Image (cartoon, rainbow, N blue to C red):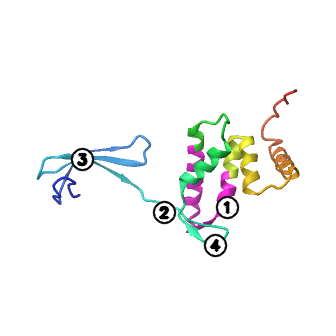
Amino acid sequence: MRCPFCRHDDTQVVDSRVSEDGAAIRRRRRCPACDKRFTTYERVELALPAVVKKDGSRTEFDRRKIVASMQLALRKRPVAADAVDAAASRIEYQLLGSGEREVRSERLGELVMNELRALDTIAYVRFASVYRRFEDVSEFEDVIEEFRRTNANAAPAKPSRKR
């Protein structure tokens, strides 16, 4: 590897370690020409699929957009930032695992909804209302009823709050 200080073509690896998350290798290098040291990181380069929007245009997958949309739905909800980050990672892994070169924005929205459904019911309904463009209260009721049906056997119901 070329030295960033003197541009010498051959540097020596002094130390190599796996990063804390296991996703990269950290290498300490030394240049024999100028004797300076520097750090490099080696990571796997994964190609996420392009996102095909409703109008047919294509754009690069942007994890920040996924996280931002989830954070908006989760605003003022008791969900940790780490949980949102983990959900975004699961979405990325699903996309990488599919092997597809493109993903429709509708599919991406469904993946986000599924993650929000597991994180927080209110956030799930909020996101669904925007994503599916609800126009009246009955559409909220339909989503809530669907949620209740699919979760009837999954977990015991919480007692309702009386006002």
Separation of marks 1 and 2 at Cα, in angstroms: 18 Å
- Camera-nearest label, 1 or 4: 4
Q: Are dots 1 and 4 in contact, CB under 8 Å?
A: no
Q: Position of residue 43 (x, y in %)?
A: 39, 53
Q: Are marks 3 and 2 in contact (CB under 8 Å)?
A: no
Q: Which residues are magenta?
A: 85-112
Amino acid type, residue under disc 1 in the picture: Arg
Sequence order check, earlier mark of 3 and 2: 3
Can you say which quadrant of the picture contains the N terminus?
bottom left
Q: CA distance from mark 3 to mark 1?
A: 43 Å
Nearest to N terminus: mark 4 or mark 3: 3
Instruction: In the rendered structure, find residue 47 and report the number of the disc placed on it.
Output: 2
Q: Spot the residue most to the bottom.
A: 56
Front disc: 4 or 3: 4
- Residue placed under numbered mark 1 in the picture: 107
Residue at x 20%, y 55% (from the top left corner):
3
Give amino acid for label 2: Ala
Q: Give the residue at mark 4.
A: 56
What is the spatial separation of the Cα atoms under label 4 and label 2, in whole angstroms?
Answer: 20 Å
- How many neighbours does mark 3 have within 10 angstroms: few (below 14), some (14-19), or many (20 or more)? some
Specify the amino acid type for callout 3: Phe
Q: Residue at x 17, y 46 (%)?
A: 36
The CA span between labels 3 and 2 is 28 Å
